[in-house]
C-alpha cells in the first residue's frame, strides 16, 4: 500500500511519526512520484521496491 500525508505546516511535517508497518519514506524517490508511478510497469516497480527490501509476490 502506498499512502500520502499532507501537512498544514513544515513543523507538522517534520514531527510526523509514520504509523507502525511503514516500510520507507518515499518523498524524494523519483520512482514513486504520482506522475511517474502511473506510467511504471511491474518490472520498474519491482526494481524500485527492491531498494527498500520489499519484494512483489
Image (spheres, rainbow, N blue to C red):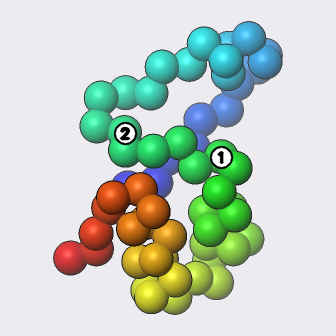
**Towards the viewer: 48 or 37:** 48
**Towards the viewer: 13 or 29:** 29
Instruction: Give the residue at x 30% y 29%.
Output: 20
How far separated are the C-alphas under marks 2 and 1?
13 Å
Mark 1 packing: few (<14 Cα in 10 Å), some, or many (20+)? few
Q: Secondary structure at mark 1?
A: loop
In this picture, residue 11 sits left or right of residue 43: right
Q: Position of residue 41 (x, y in %)?
A: 52, 88
Mark 2 packing: few (<14 Cα in 10 Å), some, or many (20+)? few
The residue indicated by pointer 1 is 27
Is 31 drawn above or below residue 27 in the view shown? below
Is 50 drawn above or below residue 17 in the view shown? below
Residue 22 shows which numbered tag?
A: 2
Instruction: Give the residue at x 43% y 86%.
Output: 42
Instruction: Give the residue at x 69% y 74%.
Output: 36
Q: Position of residue 17 (x, y in %)?
A: 48, 19
Return the residue found at the far right: 9
Instruction: Give the residue at x 45% y 44%.
Output: 24
In this picture, residue 18 sits left or right of residue 12: left
Amino acid at each position: 500500500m502506498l499512502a500520502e500525508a499532507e501537512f498544514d505546516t513544515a513543523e507538522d511535517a517534520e514531527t510526523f511519526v509514520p504509523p507502525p508497518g511503514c516500510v520507507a519514506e518515499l518523498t524524494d524517490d523519483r520512482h514513486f512520484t504520482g506522475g511517474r508511478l502511473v506510467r511504471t510497469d511491474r518490472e520498474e516497480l519491482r526494481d524500485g521496491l527492491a531498494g527498500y527490501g520489499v519484494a512483489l509476490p
